[in-house]
Amino acid sequence: MPAILSGCAKPDDWRARVDGRWVGDNAVLGHRVRDAAAHPPANARARRCDVLVVGSGIAGLSAARALQRAGIADFAVLELEDAPGGNSRGHAMHGLRCPLGAHYLPLPGPSAPDIQSWLVEIGLARSTPSGLKWDERQLCHSPQERLFFNGRWQEGLLPDVPRASATQAQYRRFAKAVAEAGEIGFALPTNRAPWTPAHAALDAVTAAQWLHGQGIVDPLVLAYLDYCCRDDYGAGIATVSAWALVHYFASRHGFRAPGDDGNDRDPVLTWPDGNAPLMQALRRPFADRVLTDRAVFRIDEGLQDVTAWAFAGAEVERWTARHVVVATPLFIAAHVLSAPPPALVAAAKQQRRAPWMVANLLLDALPLDRVGAPLSWDNVIHGSASLGYVDAQHQSLARVVGPRLLTAYWAFADADRRRLLEMPWQDATQMILDDLRVVHPDLSERLQQVDLVRHGHAMSIPAPGLRSSAALAAVPECAARLSFAHADLSAYSVFEEAFTRGDAAGRRVARALGLAAS
């Protein structure tokens, strides 16, 4: 078909020739855990270790790393899925790597020295008298991001407007509001800054309410901030708290209006398969201890030991350990523990979770593109319900020819979880194609294969009242023989929170067993 006519292709023509499937999250096994009988079978296969870690997301792997560094050799990590990593898993299609979830890590600041040290340890940075020097091959290359706005692509994600416009004035008003609110103290991870009544006041209202109170009402500014919240938290400014919005900027790079000094985007670490290389570096020293396809469905804390039952294929395993690190989302921890702490149950009930869809689109060549800024690492359409797409081959140091891989992201409302679960891959693909057709009219013609993953409970949404919740604050990070480690304890899900929570849990266990983590 001539390129000039490609925009006229029937939207369903691709279905007869394109291969597609759902990959990743095992909802069937997850629901088997949900529906497990109250009494485990008596003929379970017996297994034993000193420390058992339940969950191999970043928190679980970080906890295991801390255990190993403390000299604890007899530990095991159980993972429900067929591969470790949680939201940091990677994927490949016809030899091309791509992410199944998180796709970058901002360079950690001074409030995260443990993460900085680990990144030095695995060779991503080196210490110098003037500070850390990063391996530039691992930093996001230029062009980093672009926005489709007013019929063309522009550099950056903030809509370009005249410097004397009302929107530019609103950008500056927001920058001033963030700077003033940020004076109360924000850090990443969040527990590196004290929690004050001023933080609680921000956490008591939605981001939209706070913005309105600050006089920030410009539709272009609000659309950008809504995108930022959906991108980091899975929900927009009408849903997340004002604390979450301010934290997004104040804990990292702040905010500057376009054209003002300091508006450059901070560098990030990224790879073709997203954060998978970080996950693999965490797991590598103890890869043989990470057991996949093990779905823990019950944990009993006894007087001397902890017992955990797990589905393992057609078998059931009964694990006995001196200590168990529960590195799962709080709602799972509350479900599988036979006697969960009341605060854990209350906090789990308070949390809402954002379902996500990630679609990796294998194309025979780059599609037609609109005028303006060239293909970038991050590509966003202004006003879209999706979160745009990432060019999975952007980080290649060689000239890229032939097939291409684009990774599209979509955050659903928590009320749409069942809709996402029951959606055929063809319908999910059509959603993506319809969304991207405005910028790539021949995308469906270029499409060869699509591999999609649905994260039904991808992340905790920091809605008003969650971060300052008395129940969340009262969840015991460590009991007699149980420790809890998950980013949910910080009220939202990012790599830095998960790594720090896991590391702290591993160190606590080491101390409880009479050892000290290095």
Image (cartoon, rainbow, N blue to C red):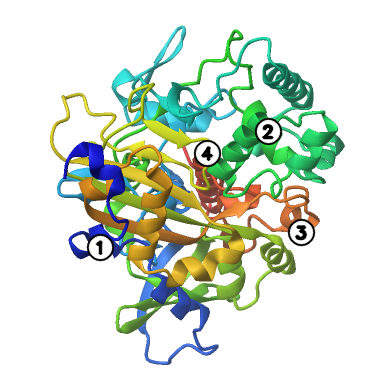
Q: Which residue is mark 2?
A: 219
The amino acid pointed to by label 3 is Ala
- For marks 2 and 3, give the one nearer the viewer: 2
Label 2, secondary structure: give it.
helix
Residue 235 position (above or below residue 55): above
Mark 2 and mark 3 lie on one chain; the one further toward the N terminus is 2
Residue marked by disc 3: 471
Callout 4–callout 2 Cβ contact below 8 Å: no
- Mark 3 or mark 4: name the one nearer the start of the chain: 3
> Circle 2: is it few (<14), some (14-19), or many (20+) Cα within 10 Å?
few
Which residue matches tag 4? 496
Q: Pointer 1: what residue?
A: 15
Badge 1 amino acid? Arg
Q: Is residue 59 visible?
A: yes
Q: Amino acid at mark 4?
A: Glu
Q: Secondary structure at mark 4?
A: helix
Give neighbour class at mark 1: few <14, some 14-19, many 20+ (Cα, 10 Å): some
Residue type indicated by callout 2: Pro
List the single residue furthest toward the left: 402
The residue nearer to you, when weighing 140 against 211, is 211
